[in-house]
Amino acid sequence: MKKINLKIILAIATLFYSAKSFSQTTTTILYDASSNLSTTKCNVFDPAVNVAGHLHTGVIGGATFSTTNGLDLPTSYTFSSLQVKRTDYRISYPFKSGYTYRIEFTAFGDVSNSTAYPSLGAALFTTAGLTLTSTACGAVYTSSVPQFGSVLITQLNGTSTTYSPSSANFTSPFNYDYLVLEATCSAAEDITANVYIQK
């Protein structure tokens, strides 16, 4: 029986189990100076770029990068219209049906209102099921694409700049091609927020 452990923290890790042996291969995705992401582009994933050997592509909105805070996914919420502007990107990875995975990332959020919190969600998609690519800058509103977060969704502390890990285990029901990460926020008023992913 094979199991795979996928981490987006210090790693995309792969665990292989067999009746006779156990081995682990780890691939790390760090959003730091070693990732060679641009610190001046308003959408670091336009065009798509390899980070730690995995293709990263903008899906909605545009992520930026700084060597201080890592990957920045901006988001905002307009209370009067209930519109969420978000930033999503995908990481190419061959998820296999029946395999068990662990998704883990280290992130924090900041927000214009100390009582609100941005959220970071993760979901799986196939190439046919996700054809969007984004050339936009900043957070974008779209009514045609539902929010994702089906594998993992977590609220990030809006008053602290301390990175904290979040994780989820799941067994993939089908073969998938991408992990999509999505930043969103909402509150009972207008807010802006950023989700910062370190690893």
Image: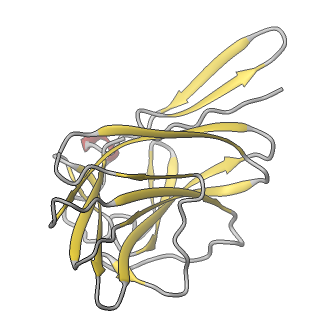
The scheme the figure's colours follow is secondary structure
> Residue lying furthest bottom in this view?
81
Quadrant (top left/top right/bottom left/bottom right) for the C terminus: top left
- Residue 138 appears in the figure: no
Question: So how many labels did they put on this image?
Answer: 0
> Residue lying furthest top in this view?
20
Q: Nearer the viewer, residue 42 or 36?
A: 42
Question: 125 left or right of 88?
Answer: right
Position in image of residue 24 (x %, y %): 62, 20
* Image point (75%, 38%), residue name: 99
* Image point (70%, 64%), residue name: 126
- Residue 62 appears in the figure: yes
Position in image of residue 106 (x %, y %): 36, 40
Q: Is residue 162 above or below residue 144?
A: above
Q: Nearer the viewer, residue 130 or 163?
A: 163
Q: Quadrant of residue 129?
A: bottom right
Question: 176 left or right of 85?
Answer: right
Q: Quadrant of residue 114?
A: bottom left
Q: Is residue 119 above or below residue 41?
A: above
* Image point (21%, 40%), residue name: 162
Position in image of residue 193 (x %, y %): 24, 66
Position in image of residue 107 (x %, y %): 32, 46
Q: Quadrant of residue 52?
A: top left
Quadrant (top left/top right/bottom left/bottom right) for the N terminus: top right
Question: 68 left or right of 77?
Answer: left
Q: Is residue 63 above or below residue 189?
A: above
Question: 64 left or right of 20?
Answer: left
